[in-house]
Image: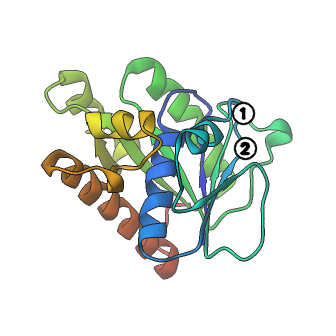
Amino acid sequence: MRICALNFKGGCGRTTLSLQLAAFYAKQRQRTLLHDRDPQGSALAWAALAEETPFSVGSSRSPGFQVEIVDTAPRMPVNGVVPQADLYVIPTLLDAVSFVVFLHTLAFVQERRLPHVIVANRVNERRAEHRARLTTPELSGALVVRERAAYSASYDLGQSVFDLPGRWAGDAQAEIGRIASAIHGLTTMGRVAA
């Protein structure tokens, strides 16, 4: 299975989501590669912080992996070419600026009829803007990642939420598990939006 995290805006959570999904798949004993195609190299920087990684992180493709997650750059692809994937995961924040760029990314994916799923990222349901944005047609059926300190804390430690103890980490682990299960179901049953 090959997943591509795609959004033309930086800071929307592509790398964080990619890292957490890679950790989930590795925990399921699937040989996993996180392919860092972002010139900022955030996934590679995370791997440098880690004592040991449960999955491979690299800047190029490599054969022999059951799961490959491609973390792309925060910009429109050169010549409109994106990495080939079974599913394109589009994470977005719910603020106005992020949403506008998300709409451009979504239009790009839809015009090319690429199979995709949307992830509303860092959702805080106490914010009226977030609640309202989640009711828009574009975010209908979006998977949700809530705003949780466990995500940034794990990055700082060169770990994933699956390495952290405690109830709050457990909530984040369950959330990533639900997203990974939804992605798996979509890719294996062919029920992805195009």
* Foreground pick, 140 / 176: 176
Which quadrant of the figure contains the C terminus? bottom right
Q: Position of residue 109 (x, y in %)?
A: 62, 49
Q: Is residue 53 above or below residue 92?
A: below
**Which residue ends up furthest to the bottom in the rendered image?**
189
Label placed on residue 37:
2
Question: Measuring 36% from the left and 44% from the top, which residue is drawn there?
Answer: 139
Identify the residue under disc 1. 76
**Relative to residue 57, is residue 9 depicted above or below?**
above
Q: Please tell me how crowded label 1 is: few (under 14), some (14-19), or many (20+) other residues with Cα within 10 Å.
A: some
Residue type, numbered disc 2: Arg
- Mark 1 is on which residue type? Met
- In what element is the residue under mark 1? loop
Give the label on residue 125, or none: none
Can residue 8 be spotted in the picture? yes
Q: Is residue 91 left or right of residue 169?
A: right
Q: What is the residue that sits farthest to the top in this orientation?
A: 97
Of mark 2 and mark 1, the one earlier in the sequence is 2
Marks 2 & 1, CB-CB < 8 Å contact: no
Q: Position of residue 46 (x, y in %)?
A: 55, 40
Q: How many marks?
A: 2
Residue 160 percent across, percent down from the top left: 40, 50
- Which residue is located at x 73 percent, y 61 percent? 84
Q: CA distance from mark 2 to mark 1?
A: 13 Å
